[in-house]
Image: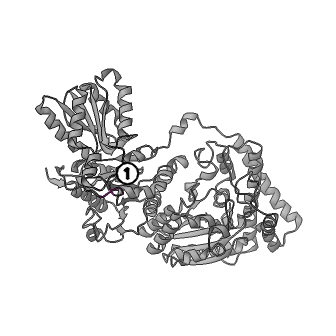
Amino acid sequence: MAKVEKKRALGEETLREFLREMLLIRRFEERVEERFRAGELPGFLHVAIGQEATAVGVCQAMEEGDIFASTHRAHGHTLARGTHPNNVMAELYGKIEGCSHGYGGSMHLYDVERGNYGANAVIGGGLPAVTGAGLAFRLRDEPRVAVAFFGDGTTNIGTFHESLNLAQLWRTKTVFVCENNHWAESTPGWQHSPVWDDMSKRALAYDMRARKVDGQDVEAVYEAALDALEYAREGRGPVFLDVRTYRMHGHYIGDPQVYRSKDDRDDAAEHDPIPRLRARLGLSDEEFQSLDDEAVGVVEAAVEFAKNGTDPQPEDALKNVYA
Amino acid sequence: MPELTYREAVRDALGAALRRDEDVFIMGEDIAEMGGSMGVTQGLLDEFGPERVRNTPISEMAIVGAGIGAAMAGMRPVVEIMYEDFLTLSLEQIVNQAAKHRYMSGGQLKIPLTIRTQGGAGWSPGAQHAQQLEAWLVHVPGLKVVFPSTPEDVRGLLWSAIYDDNPVIVFEHRLLYPVKGEVPEELEPIPIGKARVLREGTDVTVIATGPLVHHALKAASEAEADGISVEVVDPRTLQPLDEDGLVASVKKTNRAVIAHEAVTRMGFGAEVTAVLQYRAFDWLDAPIERVGSKFAPLAFAPVMEQFVVPQVEDVLAAIRRTLGK
C-alpha cells in the first residue's frame, strides 16, 4: 500500500515493502477462499495465488495518474495499486463500502481514483479501452500510461490482436502485461497457442517492443515494468511484457483441477514468489512471522469491516445505469 | 433557413464539435482521405488533420473499444462503424463494455462515446450491407439510441449525442443522406428522448422511424385524398423512448400504426405496441398495426428486396386497416 521510492536498484526496505504487499495479497486471497467455501461470499471468484510478484512489481512501478484494466483475477492488482483491503473485501461481500459499491463484485473491481478502470470478466474485453486511453494520453500530451493485465489465454481472442495492432500503429501510451501462467482455465498453453512458451512472439508480429520477464521475481518484474512504463510515457510506443508466472490454485475457487497433474501443481508450488523474496531478503523466521502476522491482521480487520458493511437497498439496482 | 442534405447535416455537427472542442476526435474505416464510404466526413481531414480525423484499420472491436478508453480518459470520441452489419463485430465492446462500465463501477466512470453507423435497404446490396439492427441495441440498459430522419434532427441529435455523458448509438440511413431539409441558422441541440410530430392529424397516428417517416408522410398525403387525417410522429430517440409523446398522440387519434424498415417480428414496433396498449388501452378503437420488413434476410434481386422491405403502399394499407377502409 505504501508508495515506494522509484529506483532501479531496490533497497532492502523497498523489497521488504514488496514482501509485505505480496503477503497481504496472499493472505487476503486465502481468506477469500475460506470464506467462499464457508458460503459467506456470493458469486464466482478467482484467486491469483502464485502470481503476487507480477501484481506488486507492475503496480509499484506505476505512477499516480497511470491507469490499468484488470481481469477476472483482479484482487492482487487492485490491492497492489493501493485500494484498501477493507474496500476490496467489502465489494466481495456486496456492500456499499465496496470499491465498486456492490455493483461489480470480484470480477469487476474498480477504483477510478487509484487508476483502476475496471476488472473485466470478458477475456480481452479491456484491451481496446486501454489502447484508447493510451491514445488519449498521447493526443493530450499527458505523461500517463494505460496498463492492461491479461493472461496467456487472451492472446487468442480478436480484441488482443486488434488492440496490439492499433496500439503499435498509433504509438499509444500503453503497456500490455501478459501474465503467462500457462493455463487458460483448464486448457494448458500447449493446447491453445503455438507460441505458448514465448508470448513475446505475438508482440513481435506487430513490431512491438517486447520483453520476457520472470514473473516470480518481483525485482525483475518491477524493473521491467518501470522500463516499459518509461518508454510508453515518453511516447516512444507501447510495450509488451511476457511475464511468466504460475497459477498455484485452480481456475476458480472450488476448481477440483481434474485436468492438472500433481507434478504440475507441485512445480507451481516450487515457484512460489514469496519464499523466494524471503530468501533474497535473508529474513529470519521471526522477522518473516512478524510480517505475516501483520498481513493476517489486516485481512482479519478487512473481513470484520466487510461483514459490518452496509447492504445496498434492492432498488439501488436501478441507479447508475446512466450518467 | 438554410437547407442542408442529411449528409451535410451530419458533417456540419461533426465539424462544429471538432472546431469547438479539442476533446472531440473522430475515427473509423476510410473516414479521412476518402471521407467515409458514404462521403459524410469529406473535408474534415483537411480542416482538422490526421490526429483528429483518424483512419483506422478494419478492426471494429478496437474502433469501438478505443473509443471507450478515450472516453474513460476524458475525451469525447465519435467513432464510425461503416455499416450496421459490421456493428455486430463490435457488439461485445458495446454491450459488455460501453453499456456497463458506469454501472459495474458503481457510478465512478462515465463513457461519453458516440457511435455513428448507417444501414438501410433499397439499393440491392444483399444480405450483409443493409440490415436495420437498432432493436438489438435498444434492449441493452446503459445505451442510448437515436435514429434521426431529417437533416435538422440528425444535426441536433448528433450534437446532443456527442455531449451526452453516456454511450449513444446514432443510426443513420443510407437512403436519407441525399435528402434535403431546412435547418436552423445556428446549430441547435435537440434533446435526446423527445419525439417530434411531423404532421398533425386526427384519425390515426403513424409512429415511424428513419426512411419510414418519409414513407408515412407520403402515405398521409395520399390518405388525405380519401378524407383520412393522419398524424405522423417520429420518436427520433428509441432509447430512452418518449412514451408520453407517443401516448398523447394516440389518445388523440385513437388508432396507431408503427412503421420501421427493420424486420417486424420482435422489433422496435413490438415494444411501442406494448407501451400503447398498456397506457392507452381505453382510447384504442382498432388493433395496433405494425409495418416492417418481412422475416427474411435481404435478397439481392431488386424485386425480392422490394418485396421484403416496407413501401409507402404498405403504410397506407395499414392506415386503412385501422379505419376498416
Give the percent coordinates (x, y) of residue A279: 82, 72
Disc 1 is attached to a residue of which chain? B
B285 relative to A3 in the view: left or right: left
- Secondary structure of the residue carrying tag 1 is strand
Q: Residues within 10 Å of mark 1 (few under 14, many from 20)?
A: many
Please say if A282 is above or below B324: below
Q: Which residues are magenta?
A: B125-129
Give the percent coordinates (x, y) of residue A41: 70, 44
Residue furthest toward the left?
Answer: B225
Quarter-of-image position of residue A17: bottom right
Q: How many marks?
A: 1
Residue furthest toward the top?
Answer: B282
| Observer able to see residue B197 | no
Amino acid of disc 1: Ile
- From the viewer's side, name the closer residue of B37 and B151: B37
B140 relative to B10 in the view: left or right: right
Q: How was this image coloured? A: one colour
| Observer able to see residue B287 | yes
Q: Quadrant of the C terminus of chain B?
A: top left
- From the viewer's side, name the closer residue of A112 and B40: B40
B177 relative to A84 in the view: left or right: left
Is most of the magenta stretch helix, strand or loop?
loop
Residue at image x 84%, y 60%? A290
Magenta region includes residue B216: no
Give the percent coordinates (x, y) of residue B306: 25, 49
Give the percent coordinates (x, y) of residue B153: 25, 47
Residue furthest toward the right?
Answer: A285
- Write down the residue under mark 1: B169
